[in-house]
Amino acid sequence: MKEKLNKILKLDRRYLFVLLTLSIVIPIIKPIGIPSKSISTSVKDTYNFIENLPEGSTIILSLDYDPSTAPELHPMASAVLKHAFKKNIKVIILTFIAGSGGLIDELVRTIPPQYSKEYGKDYVVLPYMANPLAALTQMASDIHSFYDKDINNKPLKDYEMMKNIKNYKDVAGVIGITGTALLDYWVVYVGDKYGVPILGGVTAISQVGYGPYLQKKQLKGLIGGMKGAAEYEKLISQPWKGTSGIDALNIAHILVIVFIIFSNIVLLILKFL
Amino acid sequence: MNRKFLLASVIILSLGIDAFSNKSKDSIKQNIEKIELKNLSVVDYPSDKGNSIILYFDKDEKQKNFQYEIYLSTDSANWIKAKQAKYDELSASNIEIPFWMWNKKRNINALAIDVTKVFSLQEDDYFKQNPKGFSVYAKVIAIGDNKKYESQIVKGIAKANWFRIDRLNNLVLVLIISIVFFIIVSRAKKRELFIRKIAGLEAIDEAVGRATEMGKPVVYIPGIGSMSGISTIASIFILGEVGKKIAQYDATLKVPHYDPIVFTVAKETVKQSYIEAGRPDSYREDINVYITTDQFAYAAAVDGIITREKPAACFYMGYFMAESLLLAEVGAGVGAIQIAGTDVDSQLPFFFTACDYTLIGEELYAAGAYLSKEPMLVSALKVQDFGKFLFITFAIGFSILLLIFSKIETSYAEKLLDIFRVR
Amino acid sequence: MDTQVSVILGAFVASGLTLFIFSFLYKDNPFFKIAEHLYMGVGLAWHIQLTIYKVIIPKVWEPLKLAWQNGDTFTVWMTIIPTVLGITLVTQFIPKISWISRYGFTFLMGYAAGLALPAGLATDFSNQILGTIEPFANFFSLSLGRMINAVIILIGTVSVLFYFFFSVEHKGVVKKISNFGIYFLMIYFGASFGNTVMARFSLLYGRFDLLVRYSQKEYFYATNWIIVGLLIYFIAEKIITNKLLKARS
Amino acid sequence: MNIIKKYIPLTIVFIFGIITLASYYVPHRASDEYLEWINKWENIVSAFALFLGMISLFYSHYKKIQRKVDGWGYSLFVYIGFFIIMGAAILSKGNISKEGKLTYLGWSFNNIFNPLSATMFSVLAFFIISTAYRSFKIKSFAAFLLFICGLILMLGNIPLGEIIWDKVFGWTKLTIGEIKDWIISVPSTAGRRGIMIGIAIGAAVTSLKIIFGIERGYMGKE
């Protein structure tokens, strides 16, 4: 008995891998379709922030994620962008992460046409910069002196929406969607220093760590992980990859829980045997 | 014909103007009376770049239902309306500067105005053209009791300041930390400073002892940090201590490396500890092995070592990322006593569940400092302790004070909060 | 590059590389190693090309050229000095003159340290004290729930700090408080464990989603072909090694 | 020689450190102007830092190929990967798309860089499952607390968890989402804040050490 149980505990992990694969692939092919019910307050806060902005105001969308965290963060960026366009809010997109280029490109190729938004009038994309610290500090006095050109290498000053934008004072808020510490940078070097409202979208891993900033309202709202993305998609009633993603993860989560409980029960039995 | 047309158009035009400026005409009819607003003044907004002013005047109970219109001018001839506000909207507490610069309880009407916005000036030009400050005239028109009163005209200058007095609290904090740091460093160089025993370190002895009993090796993994990280430095000092114990007990040690510089440093450290333990003869060059500077390949190779050698004890000390998961799981699988320590929060849950003992965050630094007594490590830890002490005293003390003030005098509470407010 | 061919080729390359890496889960193999090494080169090249096209050309080369033509010596110097500082970094690899790189590094470090010191203390110290004590300023007007939360945060934070306090021996009351602190740490770790699970699974979902998409007809069943290929390799390898082992014994 | 090798660099770090520090307290336009040019400088200098990584990677794999160490053939793929992307970048002049169409660089991003970097990290999901099965030991009350919080977060993160919760604990009138939010925003905030303070002071001390030239690890060997 004891040996058998020990053997079960030391099961070749490749069997577990197969189980996990099936638990995610099958729901992708055949979705379970349980709707997500609850909406967390921090996601709701983010939604309300954009919802309550006056039409025509401008936000900065700092998209600092690369393919390695895209499944969680890309749906958030897409949902926020859609929401902003729906509310006729102008968006400045920028990035400090090298691997984000293709993902941002995908967003701006697909989303603006759906809302008949025009480049330069309703949104601009700024080029990648290697050093966030310098950019974040510099934009407090003059955006144009740091970003003189946009991603297409044309003078930023020539675009209609950028004519009245000089520094953070002309911006209604910043939403940083990132899998790195860049959101901390926005809070430390921009939010607290210049009093700009900062909101965020982060991976589930770092979400919990932002508790203190949220509690102190240094962050006005936070979208966390795929669940957060699904919630935001629900709020704007535009289900996309966040919704279908969280659906596919149902079984895998249950698998983890069952495994932990199972192995601990086996351990307990072993102790008394 | 021509004249008739002209006449008609003049009439239409004047009618139009009439309709258009109906309000202003009314007010002219109303006769603006002069009024002397007490202490009406314009002062420079403190601690700013030089584009704002504060306008204030004493509150007058009789004007409770009044509306105020504030006008600015550069030459006291052409006036621009800067703001329209009700009596209650203009209080001293609206101005967001801390209590050591501004008395929020003063019974005045006050308003901060950005002059570049009012005169629609380009910021760059504004600063270039007015290096010595920008003079403004201001007047207030008070509307109430179906009458209009015009105040006296006052003059003020918006000028650039050289110090952000509102960030004085931050400066004081930086200075306190710096001074404490230098005091502690100078003391740490002279004599040993006390650090309490770290509970996890006793477990090290036990683990090494068990390895000796079982005749199995000990694997020490210093993580994937570079030599400049505090966690790696601490880890190397702990490695020195572990090495000493191992040399004493005559057990075997294996240290796989990720970073070539850490590898060289660790080699020296282990050699030294074998000498100190009086067993230089048992030291072998292959205790430390360099694997590779690639996260997953490193993890896979270490996994291989653990599965093959089946160590009695595994140490994971230093900077770890996702590989923590891969390593601790395999170690637990071979039944080793596992002791971990890292300052990466996100990896701690995995270590905590899979290891027998885990040094959490700063505990790792403390363990390094405790074992090495290195003055720089010890003094940094002491300053951190001082910071925590400050936090504890402030948090508890001020919470109690705030509780008391919230019952008796709310303005003190505001002042207390100002001390920590970040601007 | 938007033709049918490039799309199908892309599907094969993308699903191929994805599966090469996953094949590591079965065991270490040449396909994984190839993908892994490719990744190092590709990742680096991606950063380098970005730096060249988004920083060096627009921020160094073009302004320098323009300033040179206009005889604007000030701008020329203001561009050349940081460029030289940047180039000094590279001397790090030549042991004899590696000290030159100190000029570049000291500049970067001084700037970053000066910027971080006051801002870091403001955000992670002052503001955190404020966040802890602020609810007490109007404590009696809060709802019961909020009152309790404010007290929990205060007690929790302080007891965790006691746990990390190294200048006093952990005995008596101090020990009790710090033991209480451990529970708050555990709640934090537990929450971050739960969320890490979701985060890692989300990434996996992203990959599987793509593989499933590429297994469809319009992508010429790219995923399926690659899986079949890998299976053949692993089976063949197993047969050959078994034979070799037999031959040896 | 010591002067140029040691003291001038230390002076540089001190001067830039102190002036940048001071700029936090100076509202005057001069402080803005200083930050403006130093920000531009930093942008340029840090761009070159990347070439360090390039040189060290190229060198270490060159050595492997040269010495024909085990598996040196794989090192060739480092160069192959590098030149594929650089070639695509040069052909596309660094643009990912042009007039709504993907360039060579965009194609390489989508089909080479993206799958490689995304898959590398998704592999970790598999190890989560094996950790859960093989090494998640609930051996103390603290570990139990960790497990319970993890459990609540996991259930709260999936729709199925919400349903299970409502079935079992629906009578409490609390939703799992509310409990999850509370854990993140109250007790876990306290735990995290406690960790944060020490680290923040530690970082401040490190900054001080750097500015005053006490910490010189980044300068390399003396």
Image: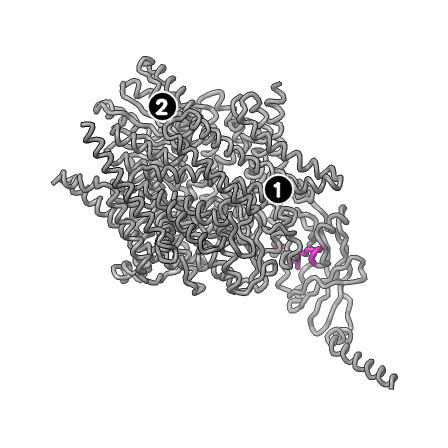
Q: Residues within 10 Å of mark 1 (few under 14, many from 20)?
A: few
The kind of secondary structure element at disc 2 is strand
Report if residue B106 lies within the magenta region: yes
Quadrant of image for the N terminus of chain A: top left
Give the letter of the chain under mark 1.
C
Name the residue that disc number 1 marks: C57
Q: Is residue C84 left or right of residue C172?
A: right
Q: Nearer the viewer, residue C196 or B179?
A: C196
The answer to which image quadrant residue D166 occupies is: bottom left
The answer to whether residue D17 of the structure is visible from this angle is yes
Residue C130 picture location, percent across and down: 50, 47
Q: Nearer the viewer, residue A108 or A60?
A: A108
Stretch in magenta: B105-117
Residue B143 picture location, percent across and down: 70, 69
> At label 2, which amino acid type do we have?
Asn
Q: Is residue B202 left or right of residue B140?
A: left
Q: Is residue D44 left or right of residue B279?
A: right
Give the letter of the chain under mark 2.
B
Report if residue A84 lies within the magenta region: no
Classify B357 as above or below B148: above
> At label 1, which amino acid type do we have?
Ile
Name the residue that disc number 2 marks: B288
Residue at the spot x=63%, y=21% of the render? D3
Real-space CA distance between mark 1 and mark 2, rounded to the nearest whole angstrom: 45 Å
Residue at the spot x=76%, y=46% of the render? B131
